[in-house]
Image (cartoon, rainbow, N blue to C red):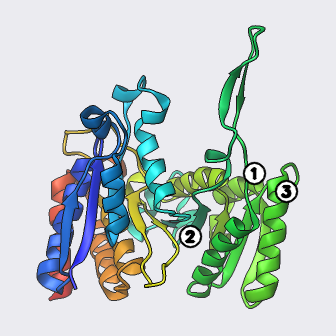
Amino acid sequence: MTRNILIVAGDGIGPEVMGEVERVIGWYNEKRGFDAKVEHELVGGCCYDAHGVAVTDETVEKAKAADAVMLGAVGGPKWDNVPYDARPEAGLLRLRKDLELFANLRPALCFAALADASSLKREIVEGLDIMIVRELTGGVYFGEPKEITDLGNGERRGVDTQLYTTSEIRRIAEVAFDLAKKRDNRVMSVEKRNVMKSGVLWYEEVSKLHKEKFSDVKLDHMLADNCAMQLVRNPKQFDVIVTDNLFGDVLSDIAAMLTGSLGMLPSASLGAKDANGKACAMYEPVHGSAPDIAGTGAANPIASILSFAMALRYTFDLGADADLLEKAVDKVLADGLRTGDIMQPGMKKVGTKEMGDAILAALDTLNA
């Protein structure tokens, strides 16, 4: 059966890093019988330039129909003054919302070859392997009312609403518990129940679900500010962290930098399975559009390539193929190749295409 992948490369370095992903997909088609058909559409600032919106209805429908969506990055200073509803990030948020991608998986994995690239000491980060499970379609980013109001006396008031329901909390917690069973069987649930009612509900519902269905998994709770501190103090204490949209956004970026570079980390955004077992899914690097280096051929494609590895694992259920791609990346790093963002003394600096070439060559070697 032909697999359908929609590539929405987006803005900045998005097209460059997605170009390397497409080469990897081609390798899997040729060497591993992957049989994927690739389509391309616009999202973000480039879509606004072409259509006046950050993503079109047609692209959203194609994304829903695809087996997996591969996204590059969106945004840049060029679009700072476009209407709020048409800003590049609105396209990303709409894809997440309309595809009902409620579960965001963001691994923080420190490759041994890059342990010295972290701003923390090697012994703190070497061997790091955390999975942050972030609720993606609720919380303060989507809650209503969301507005800026003129109070008429020279004052304005900005309002964002933090809102969660029992079902939203339970379904993301279930994803975390299921993942933990395949890892070290530990979940840390993170919220701010000391000052937020939504945090109290989160704590109660995660605890209730744990007691009902997952008592064989070790569950602990931590306040979000303490979790941020612990991530830079002793990150290897964590296995799976589950948290809401806002805290997940912040904590996953902290965890990303433990590994040495945002350019290294992938993510997966998954929906619920329908009656036929199909689930919408979007895979994207954690890094942004990096407009300062766009077009220079200097971008690190590894996060995007590892995002495709996550697609192999979570959408296409091809764990061995995912392992192969991750091993190829590890081999290239061990061989001393580095893009500028992860450059270290004594290593060989390469560009986007050269890194892609090296990963393809490593795949050939490992697949022989």
Look at 27% across and 47% down and name the residue there.
42
The residue tagged with tag 2: helix, strand or loop?
Answer: strand
Is residue 350 at all visible to an observer of this figure?
no
In-front residue for pair 204/105: 204
Q: Nearer the viewer, residue 114 or 62?
A: 62
Which element carries disc 1, helix, strand or loop? helix
For marks 3 and 2, give the one nearer the viewer.
3
Task: Say which of 59 and 106 sits in front.
Answer: 59
Residue on which disc 2 sits: 131
Disc 1 designates what residue?
225
Q: Is residue 353 left or right of residue 153?
A: left
Query: To which quarter of the image does residue 169 belong?
Result: bottom right
Q: Amino acid at mark 2?
A: Met
Mark earlier in primary sequence (3, 2): 2
246 vs 54: above or below: below
- Residue drawn at x 49%, y 30% as measured from the top left: 84
Residue bearing the label numbered 3: 193
Distance CA(mark 3)–CA(mark 2): 22 Å
